[in-house]
């Protein structure tokens, strides 16, 4: 279904309610949108499609999101891929982005969160090979953190909660919360998933 825009978005999810809701939100954001009920269906059509942003469900029958991600990126090397899941956690988000995804969204999510992902990740990647955080080097940004902030960032990306980090470092959970807020601000992260993305980009920068 198109609306005359030059940008394309593809939704791959076996849940018809998720497909319909996401399609409506993407059309509102001026994307031509095409939906697929399975990863196999998308991959069979991929060569005929214009590259665009892909919203890919993690858990699908037959071919799961991880398998689809690997195959679609072999053809669309720089495509922004947003992994989506109703059973997400920090390790899954980290794994998704280390596997080549551009972002991770946990269901359910609304128009505001989707718009943020589109404007900070998807559209910049579609229009620039430099990627969604092209305005600054992720490696330099992470290097600007204090030793304690860098230590806490590593624990956060490893999936540890504030209380566990506090116990490991011998500080209070409140102190961890303060450091976490400062890290978000210094790295200009708009969400925790965005923070994870910056940290992973810094590893590969």
Image (cartoon, rainbow, N blue to C red):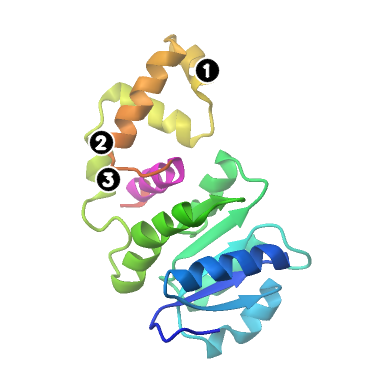
**Quarter-of-image position of residue 192:** top left
Label 1 Cα crowd, 10 Å radius (few <14 / some 14-19 / many 20+): some
Residue 16 versus residue 183 in the image, above or below: below
Q: Which residue is found at the position 62% from the left and 76% from the top?
A: 35
Residue 154 visible (yes or no): yes
Asked which secondary structure carries label 2, the reply is helix
Does the residue at mark 1 contact the one at mark 3 (Cβ under 8 Å)?
A: no
Q: How many marks?
A: 3
Whether residue 195 is in magenta: the answer is yes
**Going from the N terminus, do you reach mark 1 or mark 2 first?**
1
Does the residue at mark 1 contact the one at mark 2 (Cβ under 8 Å)?
A: no
Label 3 Cα crowd, 10 Å radius (few <14 / some 14-19 / many 20+): some
Label 2 Cα crowd, 10 Å radius (few <14 / some 14-19 / many 20+): few
2 or 3: mark nearer the eye: 2
**Going from the N terminus, do you reach mark 1 or mark 3 first?**
3
Secondary structure mostly seen in magenta is: helix
Which mark, residue 186? 2
Whether residue 196 is in magenta: the answer is yes
Residue 150 visible (yes or no): no
Question: Badge 1 is on which residue?
Answer: 163
Magenta stretch: give its range. Answer: 192-202
On the picture, is 174 further left or further right than 83? Answer: left
Query: Residue 124, percent across and down?
Result: 32, 65
45 or 66, which is in the foreground? Answer: 45
Question: In 3D space, how far apart are the residues under numbered discs 1 and 3 (Cα atoms)?
Answer: 27 Å
Residue 6 versus residue 39 in the image, above or below: below
Q: Which residue is found at the position 35% from the left and 61% from the top?
A: 119
Question: Badge 3 is on which residue?
Answer: 139
Asked which secondary structure carries label 1, the reply is helix
Query: Residue 89, percent across and down?
Result: 60, 41
Query: Residue 65, percent across and down?
Result: 64, 62
Query: Residue 45, percent across and down?
Result: 61, 86
């Amino acid at each position: 279904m198109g609306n005359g825009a030059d940008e394309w978005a593809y939704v791959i999810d076996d849940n018809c309610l998720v497909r319909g809701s996401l399609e409506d939100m993407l059309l509102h954001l001026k994307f031509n949108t095409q939906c697929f009920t399975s990863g196999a269906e998308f991959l069979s059509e991929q060569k005929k499609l214009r590259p665009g942003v892909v919203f890919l469900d993690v858990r699908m029958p037959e071919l799961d999101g991880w398998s689809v991600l690997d195959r679609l990126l072999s053809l669309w090397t720089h495509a922004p891929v947003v992994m989506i899941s109703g059973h997400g956690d920090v390790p899954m988000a980290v794994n998704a982005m280390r596997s080549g995804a551009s972002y991770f969204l946990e269901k359910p999510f609304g128009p505001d969160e989707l718009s943020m992902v589109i404007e900070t990740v998807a559209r910049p990647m579609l229009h620039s090979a430099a990627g969604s955080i092209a305005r600054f080097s992720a490696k330099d940004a992470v290097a600007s953190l204090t030793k304690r902030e860098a230590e806490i960032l590593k624990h956060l990306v490893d999936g540890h909660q504030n209380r566990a980090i506090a116990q490991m470092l011998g500080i209070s959970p409140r102190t961890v919360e303060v450091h976490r807020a400062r890290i978000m601000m210094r790295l200009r992260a708009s969400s925790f998933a965005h923070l994870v993305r910056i940290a992973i980009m810094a590893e590969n920068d």
